[in-house]
Structures are given as structure tokens and as C-alpha cells.
Image (tube, helix red, strand yellow):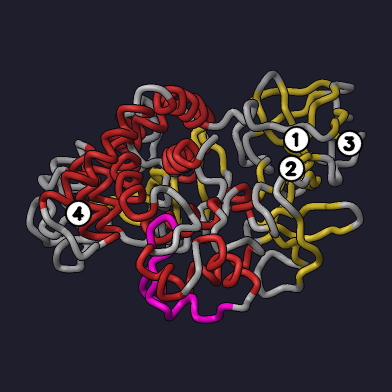
Amino acid sequence: MDNEQIIWTFLKGKGFNDYAVAGIMGNLWAESGLKPNNLQNTYEKSLGLNDDQYTAAVDNGTYTNFARDSAGYGLAQWTYWTRKQNLLARAKAAGTSIADLSTQLNYLYEELSSNAAIMQALAIADSVKAASDVILLKFERPKDQSEAAKNRRAGFGQTYYDKYAGTTTTQQRESEAGKMGAKAQKAVDYAVAIARDDSHGYDQVDRWGNPNFDCSGLVITAYEKAGVPVKTNGATYTGNMRKVFLKTGFTDVTSKVNLKTTAGMKVGDVLLAEGKHTALYTGSGQLVHASINEKGKATGGATGDQTQKEICVRPYYNYPWGCVLRLSEADTGAADFKSVGTVTVTGSAVNVRTGGSTAYKVIAVAKKGDVLQYDGTQQNGWYHVLINGVAGYISNNYSKPSTAAGFTRKVTCNANGVRIRKGGSTDTAILTTVRKGTVMYWDNTKQNGWYHVKYGTTVGYMHPDYVTV
């Protein structure tokens, strides 16, 4: 794929709508021509370096004024010193060039997703022009912000929209819909629509949508409206949601996600701090929740949303959440299940459950002697297996793995100069550096979201941005 296809696919993968992706790309084209090694033209002469020479000099350390030289650089023509400094730090941490496209795209998303106003504006953009103006005025902020400049950038974006919106987008939406489940998406759509309708505010007394909600009222109602009878089955507040949701087709996937980074989370996941707060994960590093009224209190406010923040979509944060619940239809596990061995059932009639304890819902019964596919992961010592096309957990007291998992799952490095480290952070020692396309093996475990991989005789951790499973 060329750069424009890679960028379109990356941004769509982050959950941006077609207008937003096109608006972003139109601005990136205006800034850099979608070239990640692009040095601002006026600085090529003053520095005596072209794009490639400047990039190489920064990468090899012979040019040390990258952050402070005020020269625009890269896809977004990052200019301000702190932004360039952060880009350089990200490249160094990953062991990549500052011109690495993957590094810059991840940095671009990091900047965008940290700005709630931009993310909300892009989410509701109803045209390429609207999205393009958001990026021009709130993110790029060029000197020329005239109507002519706005129209020119929107025109670039419209070209990408016309080229890709009817093709890649349709396929991707169908794929994502299959992964996340229709009901999970309906629940999120309902909650987001409530957040955008200021007739609904926050209140813990009037909490079931007539017209206000509190946090649990919103999440429970969203899934009830989507056809999942959690309210009918007795869910009434954050203190009993987990118990009822698990009995109504949800699985506790806390062990599969990173609560700090959202890695592993899917659209529709219920974020829950029992007895305290709950929200729905909407994808793209965002959540929707009913927060607090305009007085900063749980009751006594005016009807409706007085601040546009009482019920809102906002960047993800860790409350901290005690658990993450996922509707089973959103993750039967079959599509993502990667077998690395088998488990043989040793008990006569053994329940397979949605989670790793007897508190979870039974989804199947395995017979003695049954051989089940096993992905090498466990929850509370229970093996994660596949039975009748559905992933679940079987007690290790009544089953035995017949093949050790080990480093058997093939993964690939997707960038050049990426470091394998001793632990799951940039603070740990570098063990080796690998190139783009390098094949490694993963044992299905992570540390702080970093993949535990084996390359030759080297065993260590690689940042998730640079691993393709």
C-alpha cells in the first residue's frame, strides 16, 4: 500500500468516521504531501539539508537541534519545540527513524485523542469541510486560516473521501460490526445519542431517561434498548451490575485488556467500578458516561445538560475500573482464538464457563476425554479453550493441557529499528534491535501491554505499536 492507503486504513482503524479521516488527510496533504520525511521547504536552504539529509542527521545524532530549530517536519509539519521533542522521544523509544510512518501516525493519534474538543468535533462532523476546518483551526493552526485556505484543504480531503469512502470503509464497517456485535454497537449508539442531546442531564433520582440519567441508568438502559435484558433481569445500580450482566450473556474480560492504555478493549465494553461509577467504551480511545450535574453534585440540578459535560463522550480515563464486561455476542472468541495446543477433559461432565470461576455463566458441558483447542492463556488458573465454536474457560481441576503453549504464536515486527527490551517499558534494558518484517514468536502474554516475544535466543518485550499479530 502507498502512504495514502496506509494513512486512511490506520485512521479508520482508530474509529474515525469517513469525514474525519478525509478532513485529517486533506490537512496532512497541505502540510507535507503525506511525506513523513518532509522538511519545511524554507528551512532546506537555511540549514543546507534536504529531506533525506536532515532526517539522517537527526537519526544518527549529528544534528542535535531538531526540537528547537522551529522547522516544520513530518506528516503534520510539527514545529513547536515540545511537539517535535515528543516525536523524537517516541522514535527513540521505539528504535525507529523520526521519519517512520508508523511512528508518526501513532504520535498523530496520540495528539488528537488527547484533545477532547477535537475528538468530539470530529465525531459529529457531517461533511469533509466540517472535519477539515476542525483540524485546520484546532490542530494545525497555520498562519493562513482564510476561507480560501479552508476550502483548499477541504478540497484535498474531498479527493480522499471520493476515492476511499465507498470502498475500504464499507468493508471495514462490516468487519468491525462482526467483531463487536450488533447489540453492543446499538448500545453505544444509544448512549452517544443521549450524550449529544442536551435535554438529558445527570441526576441520581430521575435516572432512567425521563429525561435524565445517572451513570448506571445510562449503561443499563443502553443495553436494555439494544435488546439485552439487563434491567429486566435485575440490574439497578453499579453495585449489582456485574452479577446481573454476567448472568445475561456478558463475560469479564478484565484480564484481556489494559486499563491504562485501552489495548484489547472493544466497542461496547462496560467499564465498571462496583458501587461507584460505570461507562461504555466507544472505541478510538473514547468513552461515554453520565458524569455529574452542573453543580458538581449527584442531585438537585436543572433538568437537561447545562454544561454539555453532564452526559458526554470524552477521552478514556481509568477511574480506576475494577472490571471490564463484554457482551458475549461481541466476543464469542472464535474469530480471534489462536490455538497453540490442546486441553484434554479429565472429569466426567465439566462445565465450560464465560470466566475463570464457578461464578460465571455456563456456556457448554465437556465430556471426559474431549480434546479442546487451547490458546495458552488462563484466568484464575482456568484454561481458555474453544468448544462448539465458542471460547470459554474450563477448570484446571478437571482438565489437563496436552501441549505447552510456549512461544508458538507467530508475530511480525512492522517497523525498522524496533527494540526488544528486558521488560514492558522504555525504562528497561535493550536486548536487541530488529528490522521491519522480522518474524518472532509470542507466548500470548503481555506486560503493561507489551508483547512477550522470542527472537532467536532472545526473549523480551516489544511495544504493541510495532507488533503485527
Q: Amino acid at mark 4?
A: Tyr
Of label 1 and label 4, which has the lower sequence position?
Answer: 4
436 left or right of 287?
right
Give the secondary structure at mark 3.
strand
Q: What span is in magenta?
A: 63-82
Q: Residue at x 73, y 37 (%)?
A: 384
Q: Residue at x 55, y 63 (%)?
A: 98
> What is the x, y in percent for residue 373?
79, 28
Q: Dot 4: few (<14), some (14–19), or many (≥20) neighbours within 10 Å? A: many
**Residue at the spot of label 4:** 202
Q: Amino acid at mark 1?
A: Ile
**Residue at the spot of label 3:** 400
For the question of whether residue 244 can be seen, the reply is: no
Measure how far apart labels 2 and 3 are at the Cα level: 27 Å
> What is the x, y in percent for residue 77?
38, 61
Query: Which image quarter: residue 58?
Result: bottom right
Of label 1 and label 2, which has the lower sequence position?
Answer: 1
Measure how far apart labels 1 and 2 are at the Cα level: 27 Å
**Residue at the spot of label 1:** 394
Give the secondary structure at mark 1.
strand
Q: Residue furthest top?
A: 388
Give the secondary structure at mark 4.
loop
